[in-house]
Amino acid sequence: MPESGFHFAQPLWLLALLAIPLVWLWLRYSRTVRRRGRESLYADEHLLPWLTGEVRGQAPDSTPVLAAWSLAWLLMVLAMAGPRWDYERINAFRPAAEMVVLLDISASMNIRDVRPSRLDRAKQEIQDLLRLNPGLRVGLIAFATVAHVISPVTEDMESLQRTLPSLSTDLVTLPGSRLGNALDKASLLLHGDDKALARHILLITDGDFDEPGLLKKVDELRANNIHLHILAVGTDGGGLVPVRYVPRGARTPVSRLNEEELRQLAEHGGGLYQLADYREDDTRNLLEQILADAEQQQVEEMPTRVWNERFYLLLFPVIFLVLYLFGRGNRFSRRLS
């Protein structure tokens, strides 16, 4: 599409103009040709209609009506193609907020006390978050005993979507989960000098970690204006950790959702605690709270060009053509009968 000047927004609609010559050709060559009998031997060509009585039954010329229909079709197709020739420049706005998602991929996330599994449910929550994202810049960290930065803070939601299927507990070699290391890396991703920018961390986990000093670390994040939100995945009843993640000879542990500790972490982090479910309400509530904390900032380096649509100008003559064609008891059908 050209940057300026006259152009069509949907130029493929112009192919519909080919219908006009096709209809004219069809009408031209589909008329029945009267076979001449022996009477043509006894009268001149211009006198034959009077001899056979065809003068009184002769149909009127339908060319004006067909021309009107062709013009109406032409104007409607041009309107559908979306003619444009001027525009206005406006500056885009986006929420002044960033968020890093911490995804727990430890062995306990393979438990199926929620369907299809805790990890699959967590990835579904991230998919909802990326789909409903109103413009936040988002980063992603996967953690178990060690935290790995999957994506820095970015505006490319499609790239984040493509990375989700590859995240699994098979990437983990050691049992256990360490949240402190993941929080440190999230803090580094959110580090910046813009004090007006709201910074948030979303932790998606079952809370199956026993690590000292977490509350102190969360308090430090809160002092640096970084909020911690938690989406809890799992149930109070819990389930058995899959056997392949349990050392040989050891007793198979039971992993339960640690709601009490997770609520305490969210409270210290000044964030929202929610239990992940099948609906989108949990994700919407989270985004609403983040947006309430973020002021809308203008993105001056990303001006948006808004074209003025002019298709309606072509519809005014179409109205008069339709009134002509369908006036006086459907003139079109009468002339072609």
Image: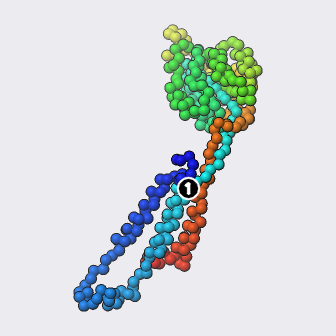
> Mark 1: which amino acid?
Pro
Query: In the image, 52: left or right of 225?
Result: left
Residue 182 location in percent, x, y? 63, 18
- Report the residue at 71% width, 16% height from top: 217
* Mark 1 surroundings within 10 Å by alpha-carbon count, few (fewer than 14), some (14 through 19), many (20 or more): many
Looking at this view, is 150 or 46 the one in front?
A: 46
Seen as rendered, the residue at the extreme right is 223
Res 222 quadrant in image: top right
Question: Which image quadrant is residue 328 in?
Answer: bottom right
Residue ID at (56%, 14%): 175
Query: Label 1, on which residue?
Result: 83
Residue at 52%, 11% in the rendered image? 247
Quadrant location of the C terminus in the rendered image: bottom left
- From where the camera sits, is residue 204 visible? no
Residue 82 or 224: which is nearer the viewer?
Answer: 82
Residue displayed at 66% across by 28% down: 99
